[in-house]
């Protein structure tokens, strides 16, 4: 069985500051990892995904995440955030590369202060 | 591309009535569609997986007779909440995998159900 833990339910950050959203997972099998973003009143949008290969994954909107197998982490980072990054961010894990069954974390609300 | 729509976006109903929510893939064909439920300030919980033309596979603890899922075509899946009660109030989100087999689920905008 897989599970995902997002330790921070809310992260307030000043505009143009860097941000890291933490995600840890547990799994007894190889995993595929995802970060999704949910803007207010919208559906989920894929930010980035790790399936295999390079452990540093670059996604849309300047976000990147690093897969760390020894620490079972997949933290999301952005060097400089904008007001438009205000949203809910979900880390997710799947044992299937086709993402047929995804287990989501509880989400982290990123709020950007001007 | 890869847009998934849901209808309605919001619905309020009386306790005991049934509510149907539609999920459509607008610009691609979906072999598989998924239904999630999201509680306030909580994560998404997978309710069921539906494949076109076959019965849905429900997750443990989800009542199949209460949450009826139909996947009649490659672009449409419906979730019917039967005899709804206030505890069924939630945000329901669908997603779809393309027949092209890409490793990405495309999510709909969600439907807010409120049962009075």
Image (cartoon, rainbow, N blue to C red):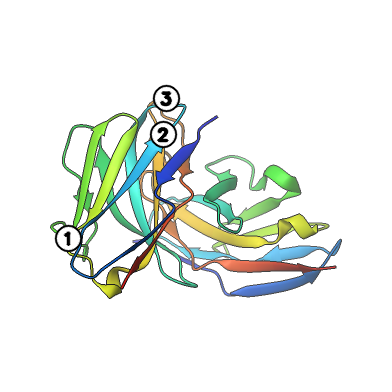
Please, what secondary structure does the residue beneath circle 3 have? loop
Whether residues under marks 1 and 2 lie with C-beta atoms below 8 angstroms apart, the answer is no
Please, what secondary structure does the residue beneath circle 1 have? loop
Q: Residues within 10 Å of mark 1 (few under 14, many from 20)?
A: some
Q: Which mark is residue B25?
A: 2
Residue B59 location, x and y as percent?
24, 58
Same chain under badges 1 and 2? The reply is: yes
Determine which residue is flagged by label 1: B66
Same chain under badges 3 and 1? The reply is: yes
* Quadrant of the snapshot with the C terminus of chain B: bottom left
Determine which residue is flagged by label 3: B100
Residue B107 location, x and y as percent?
47, 45
**Nearer to us: label 2 or label 3:** 2
Question: Closest to the observer: A79 or A70?
Answer: A79
The vertical placement of B94 against B103, above or below, is below
Q: Which mark is residue A91?
A: none
Q: Earlier in the sequence, mark 3 or mark 1?
A: 1
């Amino acid at each position: 069985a897989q599970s995902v833990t997002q330790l921070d339910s809310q992260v307030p950050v000043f505009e143009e500051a860097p941000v890291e959203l933490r995600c840890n997972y547990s799994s007894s099998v190889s995993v595929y990892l995802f970060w999704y973003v949910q803007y207010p009143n919208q559906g989920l949008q894929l930010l980035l995904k790790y399936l295999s290969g390079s452990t540093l994954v670059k996604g849309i909107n300047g976000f990147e995440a690093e897969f760390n197998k020894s620490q079972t982490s997949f933290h999301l980072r952005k060097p400089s955030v904008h007001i438009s990054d205000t949203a809910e961010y979900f880390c997710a894990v799947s044992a299937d590369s086709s993402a047929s069954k995804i287990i989501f974390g509880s989400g982290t609300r990123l709020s950007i202060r001007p | 591309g890869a847009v998934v729509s849901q209808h309605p976006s919001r619905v309020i109903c009386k306790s005991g009535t049934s509510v149907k929510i539609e999920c459509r893939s607008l610009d691609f064909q979906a072999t598989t569609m998924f239904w999630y439920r999201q509680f306030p300030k909580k994560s998404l919980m997978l309710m069921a997986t539906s494949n076109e033309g076959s019965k849905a596979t429900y997750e443990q603890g989800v009542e199949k007779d209460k949450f009826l899922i139909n996947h009649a075509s490659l672009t449409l899946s419906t979730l019917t909440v039967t005899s709804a009660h206030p505890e069924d109030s939630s945000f329901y989100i669908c997603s779809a995998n393309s027949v092209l087999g890409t490793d990405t689920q495309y999510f709909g905008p969600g439907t807010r159900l409120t049962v009075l």
